[in-house]
Amino acid sequence: QDHLKTKSNYKLYKRVVAGLVCLVVILSVSGFGTSMAAAILTEDTVADKDSGTIQTTSGEVVGFQEVAFEFDLDPLTDEEFDERRRLVDAEMAEDPNHPDHIHRRLGRKGKMKNGAGAQVNYDNVQVNQKDLEDMANRCQGGNIVSIRRRWRDDNVVDDDVKTLCNPGTELVRKKKRTNNKKRKKAKVVDEQVTFRKHRMNGEDASIVFDCNGGKCHGSGAGLQQEVGHPCQLSRDRDTSSECMQGFVCYRAGSPNGGDGVGSCTFLSEYAREEQICNMDYGVDACESGLACLDTMRTNSRMAVRGVRKGICSPVRDFSREGGVCDVAHGDDACVNDYRCLSANGREIGNAGIGYCMNTPTFS
């Protein structure tokens, strides 16, 4: 019996050894085949460092190298901003529906209260055309490209980084032909480059660059700043702002705007005296005894895109028709033949902020 058992174990060991030998042979053949395939692919493909793609010798893209890149954008000076603004206004006045300016129309006049909201997205940054083409090529290759913006206030530098593109970004390049300096050979360059994408809530977040003379100026919803992010106070005027719609660029101690760097802020109700306020909140814009007074007559920078800004100030006597008034001032609240009433024409009582009207609608 011991002899039979030993013989059986011997046969089992032979089978195990044979199986292991076969496995080693299969692995060796597989490794050799992989090496041969890699060698063949190496000969037929090449990595393009500019676009971040793997291409065949014929130029066909067969893969991507997902790499992150970062580029710096240069801010516009106030003089450059005003120059670009005048140019854009003139072009949009000539043809407001031109495809090149679709990305600038963030709203239409009359959609906000009291006619506010004629919103235009002006250029705020610039970059060399060569750098923009590099950015576009890398985006086209499926890379992640970020852009860095800087705001300088005296010796303090504030910066902010946004994603220009990722593998899901749609790239639209409008080309034009131009002559070189010797005018011997035409060259095709980018005239407008659009990095089309959307935010998580579905809103447009595209960034568009318009190029001319070797410089490209950037604008678009994707460059608008969110709450808490830096912004240029001097750009927060008329129909422009570096902040997203509904926000204003504000810095404590500078309610009237001015120069320097602020942060994008949402204006809440019941602001205090001398604080910036949203006039569309009506009598709730400021604390009791104060009114959000229109300062646009003395400071054009207060008419901000989507937000009618004012300053919380004590209400004066003898307000005119439609002006803000304080009932506590009695007969001196409004000019002759007008009364201080609520926005819907009702009597307010002995205290409160209202508007000067001719006669009440309700008693």
Image (cartoon, rainbow, N blue to C red):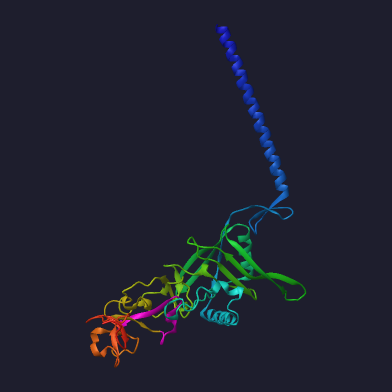
| Position of residue 184 in the picture relative to residue 108 (left or right) | right
Q: What residue is at 68 percent from the left and 40 percent from the top?
A: 35
Q: Quadrant of residue 69?
A: bottom right
On the image, which quarter does residue 191 sit in? bottom right
Residue 331's place in the image compared with 276, above or below, is: below
Q: Position of residue 86 (x, y in %)?
A: 55, 82
Residue 109 versus residue 34 in the image, above or below: below
- Is 293 magenta? The answer is no
Residue span colored magenta:
296-315
The number of callouts visible is 0
Front in this rendered view, residue 84 or 70: 84
At which x and y percent is residue 136?
A: 62, 64
Q: In this rendered view, identify the residue nearer to me: 307 or 207.
A: 307
Residue 156 in sight here: no
| Name of the residue lying farthest toward the right | 184
Residue extending farthest to the left is 350
Is residue 198 depicted above or below 281 in this figure?
above
Left or right, 157 with reference to 276: right
Whether the magenta-drawn stretch holds residue 306 is answered as: yes
Residue 43 drawn at (x, y percent): 73, 48
State the image quarter where residue 21 is shown. top right
Residue 142 image point, x, y percent: 61, 57
Q: Quadrant of the C terminus?
A: bottom left
Give the residue furthest to the bottom: 336
Whether residue 346 is visible, yes or no, is: yes
Quarter of the figure that contains the N terminus:
top right
Residue at the (24%, 87%) spot, across then down = 329
Determine the residue located farthest toward the top in the rendered image.
Answer: 1
